[in-house]
Image (cartoon, grey):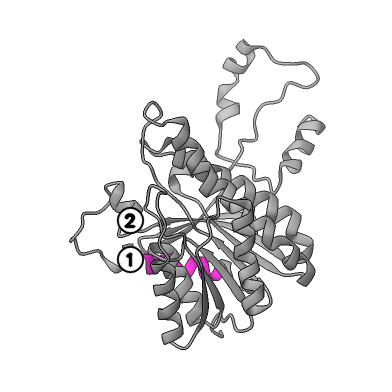
Amino acid sequence: MADIRFEGRTAIVTGAGRGLGRAYALELARRGAAVVVNDLGGTVEGTDADTAPADAVVAEIVAAGGQAVASYASVASPDEAASIVQRALDAFGRVDVVVANAGILRGKSVLRTSPEDFDAHLDVHTKGSFYVARAAWPTMREQNYGRFVFISSLAGIFGLAGSAAYGTAKAAVIGLSNVIAIEGARRDIRSNIVAPVAVSTRMAMLGGAATTGTEIPGRLSEAAVAPMVVYLASEECAYSGSIFSAGGGRYARIRAASAPGWTTGDDPASAEAVRDHLDEITDLQRPLYFATGDDEMRLILRGE
């Protein structure tokens, strides 16, 4: 089969100055995409700013013969997020792909997470993803084409101790992606989630996943996550509203499942009845999968 290519396509990658975002931007550019390398250039905790990281990635892409421009805007501001999309339109005339990767990490337990920490994560991960997606939507709708790849985390899908704010913000991104997938379906606008695992990033090192100076196997590098992101960003992508784990040489789809359950007919249950039917309520041997919330609602209304 032919290689996946992006000639004539423009991709925005947020948080692309370092780590995973840089890997996504470089691989998209290598395959022909014009790339807006967005990065505020701050610390992992979300403080300060520096233009150097985005500029360095742009220089790397251009030196390899690709097309790229830098954006130093913060995704946490609606106006600045809109400016990222405008940067793409001004430089390349279109927006085809948004990889919403920008993030911060202040890894703390529930009790140690301050309201300010919690808000900061929501501002960057959740609101930032929404602001950029909302700004890109009109041009994607007009051209009847678009690909969103939102970067979530296993901390948001399955939970992870010491990541109260981070896990919450990353879980919220899944809901956003699901809604975009449904609303964009008629116009070939597809939206998916990647939960990456790479132990050499600044966030992974801050969380204790790797030690500085330790040799990292290639399968645990940022480059090993990029193939999943690139496929989902491509015209060939056959999925929308899906979640994928990528890292360590393993790529896997993750789905929320429902047990067939127990139904009471027209009468409401009691707490005791719920207790007595827990085997049926919790039995996932024959799981049901719903494409949208409406699908489960219809099943409930039918009393099945």
Residue type of the residue flagged with mark 1: Arg
**Is 272 placed left or right of 53 in the picture?**
right
Looking at the image, which is closer to me, 229 or 260?
229
Residue 239 is situated, as x and y percent measured from the top left of the image, at 63, 62
Q: Which mark is residue 139?
A: none
Residue under numbered circle 1: 219
**Is 213 placed left or right of 148 in the picture?**
left
Q: Main secondary structure of the magenta part?
A: helix
Q: Is residue 121 above or below residue 72?
A: above
Q: Dot 1: what SS?
A: helix
Q: From where the camera sits, is residue 295 visible?
A: yes
**Is 164 placed left or right of 281 in the picture?**
left
Examine the structure image and report whether residue 121 is included in the region drawn in magenta: no
Residue 19 is situated, as x and y percent measured from the top left of the image, at 38, 63
Residue under numbered circle 2: 202
Q: Is residue 293 above or below residue 68?
A: above
Q: How many marks?
A: 2
Looking at the image, which is closer to me, 89 or 296?
89
Residue type of the residue flagged with mark 2: Arg
